[in-house]
Amino acid sequence: MVGIVVAFAAGCGGNTTVSVVDDPTLESAFGAVLAEGQERTLGDLVQAADLQVEDWDRMYYFRVPLLMSEVNRILGTSGVVWQGLPTVGAEGMMVFMSEGRVVHAVVDRSPALALSGFATADSVVRPDTSGGLEKVGVEAKGR
């Protein structure tokens, strides 16, 4: 895992800067679901990846291409500046939240995730081969 994920940017009127990082361990945990063909919970995967973030209560998923304004609108994070938004070569971005605050943001390279809305620690994660594409489906708990 790479450095500090969320930091307050100096001189930006109190705006928060979020750095989107690569996390191969977390991606490997999702990849294992696909490779092994077994369901797990999102909380189990986060724990197996030893994600070093404070408590989180929701995970959102955004597919590439991303617009900073759209991410902020959906998350309700007005004024957040996103550094390193994924582009070509990535499937999307996972954003972990705690009580409305971003606590971790991760590039999703492979496998692709399928999530509409947000997931919680008890969301079921399972292989999804619908449409002929291999991806990992994450159970949504709300929008």
Image (tube, rainbow, N blue to C red):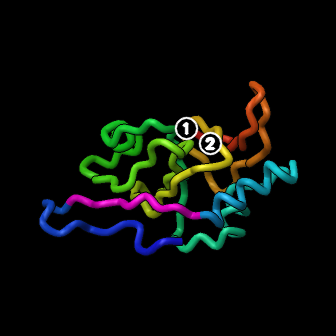
Residue where numbered disc 2 is placed? 141
Q: Quadrant of residue 10?
A: bottom left
Q: What residue did someone put label 1 on? A: 117
Q: Which residues are magenta?
A: 15-23
Q: Name the side, left or right, on which 113 lies relative to 33.
A: left
Residue 86 horizontal side relative to residue 16, left or right = right
Residue at the far front: name it: 89
Q: Is residue 100 above or below residue 46?
A: above
Give the residue drawn at x 54%, y 45%. Answer: 90
How far across and how far down the image is residue 115, in percent?
Answer: 61, 39
Give the spatial CA distance, label 1 vs label 2.
7 Å
Q: Which mark is residue 5?
A: none
Q: Amino acid at mark 2?
A: Lys
Q: Quarter of the image containing the N terminus? A: bottom right
Q: Is residue 122 left or right of residue 84?
A: right
Answer whether labels 1 and 2 touch (C-beta < 8 Å).
yes
Q: Is residue 16 magenta?
A: yes
Residue at 50% in and 41% down: 62
Res. 99 image quadrant: bottom left
User: Is 64 above or below relative to 54?
Assistant: above
Residue 21 percent coordinates (x, y): 47, 62
**Is residue 101 found left or right of 51 in the rendered image?**
left
Q: Amino acid at mark 1?
A: Gly
First of labels 1, 2 by sequence position: 1
1 vs 2, front mark:
1
